[in-house]
């Protein structure tokens, strides 16, 4: 990747943050629906990171025990299990399948 591209991306991110600082509050107070949408952004980012780490192995899609562990965690979250139970179960299911 060229240094020009890196500099352009860095400038774009900095500009986006400055615009968000000045316009974000105004948009949220003027349009209440933007406040609801803005509150969903952290969850979407975390979900995207989890999906990327779970479904890929470097440069390609990978099917292994991680997906089964995440599915087990998803079912427990859906059933409103305590957080520690979700984490321990997901880890146990993933470790158990890897041991096979």
Image (tube, grey):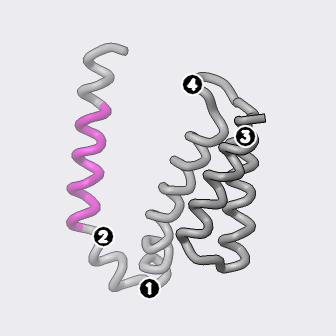
Cα–Cα gap, marks 4 and 2 = 35 Å
Q: Residue furthest top?
A: 2
Label 4 Cα crowd, 10 Å radius (few <14 / some 14-19 / many 20+): few
First reached walking from the N terminus: tag 4 or tag 2: 2
**Magenta stretch, residue numbers:** 9-22
> Mark 2 — residue?
24
Q: The N terminus appears in which quarter of the rendering?
A: top left
Residue at the spot of label 1: 32
Q: How many marks?
A: 4
Numbered disc in front, either 3 or 1? 3
Q: Circle 3 is placed at which residue position?
A: 65
Q: Marks 3 and 4, Cα distance to the nearest angstrom?
A: 16 Å
Residue at coordinates 66% horizontally, 52% vertically from top-left? 92
Query: Which is more foreground, mark 4 or mark 1?
Result: 4
Element class at badge 2: helix
Q: Are marks 4 and 2 in contact (CB under 8 Å)?
A: no
**Residue 58, disc:** 4
Q: Residue 95: x percent and y percent? A: 66, 43
């Amino acid at each position: 990747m060229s240094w020009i591209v890196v500099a352009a991306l860095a400038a774009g991110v900095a500009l986006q943050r400055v615009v968000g600082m000045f316009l974000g509050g105004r948009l949220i107070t003027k349009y209440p629906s933007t406040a609801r949408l803005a509150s969903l952004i952290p969850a979407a980012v975390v979900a995207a990171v989890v999906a990327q780490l779970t479904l890929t192995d470097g440069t390609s899609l990978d099917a292994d025990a991680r997906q089964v562990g995440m599915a087990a965690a998803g079912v427990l979250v859906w059933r409103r299990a305590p957080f520690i139970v979700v984490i321990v179960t997901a880890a146990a299911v993933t470790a158990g399948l890897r041991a096979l």
